[in-house]
Amino acid sequence: MKTSPATTSERAGAAPGWLRHAPWLIFALFVGYGFAVGGYAATVISFALVYAVFVTGLNIFMGYANQVSFGHNCFAAVAGYASAVLTTAHGWGVAPAMAAGVFLAVAVALAIGLPTLRLKGHYLAMATLACGLISYEIAVEWKSVTQGYLGISGIPPLGVAGYEVTSDRAQLTLLAAIALVATLISGRIRDSRMGRAFLALGASENGAMALGVDVTRLKLLSFVVSAAFSGLAGALFVHVVGYVSPEVFGLHMVILAFTMLYVGGVGSIAGPLVGALLVSLLPEAFRGFKDYQDLAYGAVLILLLIYAPLGVASLFARERTASREKAG
Amino acid sequence: MTPDDARILETVALTGRYGHVAALAPTDLHIRKGELVAVLGPNGAGKSTLLRAIMAQVATSGDVLFEGERLPRDPRAATARGVVLVPEGRGVFGPMTVRENLELGAYRFGKAGFERRLARVVELFPRLGERASQLAGSLSGGEQQMLAIGRALMCDPKVLLLDEPSLGIAPRVTMEIFDTLAVLRDQGLPILLVEQKAPAALKLASRAYVLSLGRVAACLATDQITSYEDLARYYL
């Protein structure tokens, strides 16, 4: 991955090189484990990777540009339902249906972003939350298209040009590649001129405005780019599961994605990937606790947030993190 | 050249408001080439609103003329024309390094001429050169203000608007910053300086506008101010 001046060794106190590769090692270990074991483990890790794509998008808007959104599930729902409907009711191939879904999600993000991104902070959070709730209601009520609570079943699996990815290992491999590419793209975005502008916007809106940066346009751009990732995740989800209903893209998705983002490391490149894997697999690790599973899961999350307040990914860049904490 | 020809920035009945609240009554002022003009006044007088109105960062009416032409009512276009604001509170990008902050100052130029601009800024503020790889948020208040001014200079301004550069900064560092402003003034850069610390600002400025309750209460040549009691009545 291209390394920005922000992460070059010239910055005092950067972590040793090998330690900074730890997130990628975690990713490789989890995917390797899922591939070796297959079955349920591969499925759980596959879902985690779909979420990793979603959270990577959310990170662009919330981590880089430092805005707030509780409504990105809306874009996952738009793309997921679009891809489901196009493949099941209109006979489209999976790849073009997914592409159409992502395109539609981006269009919806533009339509929502233009009026709502004038808001800031809590007001923006509430507006985006409302968008997520509205999308849920539309999925419930627009029965002629979405089948309401019954949902749409028989959605074809991932595939392209007549080749279907049906085995759990093949699916895991494909999703790992997609999640990795999404993370690398996110890294390239952060190191790009546009990404620097996102970071500037996130650090000081007044400062960015004073430099002649078009703040409104930049917010919209970060919103739309992140919505594209969310749309891709939504489309992937329906083809991995083979079924979609309104609950899939409900408020639970938002809460889970937030947990993944903050556990992994908001604003970091690999944080969403690490966070999605850890948060998805922690409940499985505590399955033996039976009735106390949720208690143990919650306790670990609290401990993680206490001892790694900037996310697990920050542990692999300790001194830089310390500088950032000092930066306040 | 007549005095009017020398005007680089001029406001004509410029107002500023936040929603329905008018913070700046119709205001006429001007700044000439190579001139440092101070804008003084108590808290809430409309000083910061004046600068934000010039930059079209708040709702405005009236006009701003720059080099004799109407300045576009768009912050981005105003900056592109060379009218650059150093905002109150500095607005440095804390999680980024000093160098990255300066790079963003030259955002609209890309890489063209970056090293030349950087060398000029480092010459004016050597501390920024020493702290190039340090996170901006970890700098002292005075160094952050130097960075904010340096970042604005990276935009190649034709007019610099400064909003309270001494706010929250130790007197010794304030003097250091004001010495640099004097150098910039002597190099011919027109500066509109909003400042509460009148004595320090008046040492630099050739003229001063005094704002009170959102209006220009007085325009004074600094060499005509014999006593700060002349000014004090506008603050009361």
Image (cartoon, coloured by chain):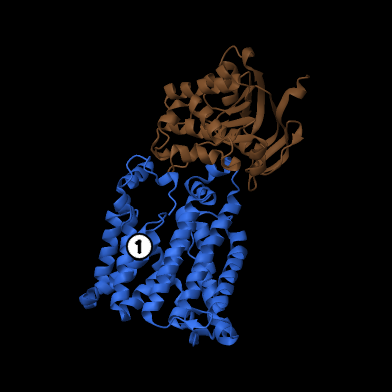
Chain colours: A blue, B brown
Closer-to-camera residue (B127/B212): B127
Q: Amino acid at mark 1?
A: Val
Number of numbered callouts drawn: 1
Query: Which residue corresponds to mark 1?
Result: A274
Q: Residue A309: x percent and y percent?
A: 32, 54
Q: Residues within 10 Å of mark 1 (few under 14, many from 20)?
A: many
Q: Residue B30: x percent and y percent?
A: 70, 27
Which residue ends up furthest to the right in the rendered image?
B2
Picture quarter containing residue A79? bottom right
Closer-to-camera residue (B85/B150): B150
- Image quarter in which the C terminus of chain A is found: top left
Q: Residue B116: x percent and y percent?
A: 55, 31
Asked if one can make out residue B142 in the rendered structure from this viewpoint, the answer is no
Q: Residue at x 56, y 70 (%)?
A: A102
Q: Residue at x 77, y 24 (%)?
A: B5
Q: Is residue A240 above or below residue A310?
A: below
- Image quarter in which the N terminus of chain A is found: bottom left
Q: Residue at x 64, y 30 (%)?
A: B159
- Residue A197 vs residue A22: left or right? right
Q: Is residue A64 above or below residue B179?
A: below
Q: Is residue A107 above or below residue A193?
A: below
Q: Is residue A197 above or below residue B192?
A: below
- Residue B63 vs residue B147: left or right? right
Quick one: SS at disc 1?
A: helix
Picture quarter containing residue A5? top left
Closer-to-camera residue (B24/A243): A243
Closer-to-camera residue (A111/A186): A186
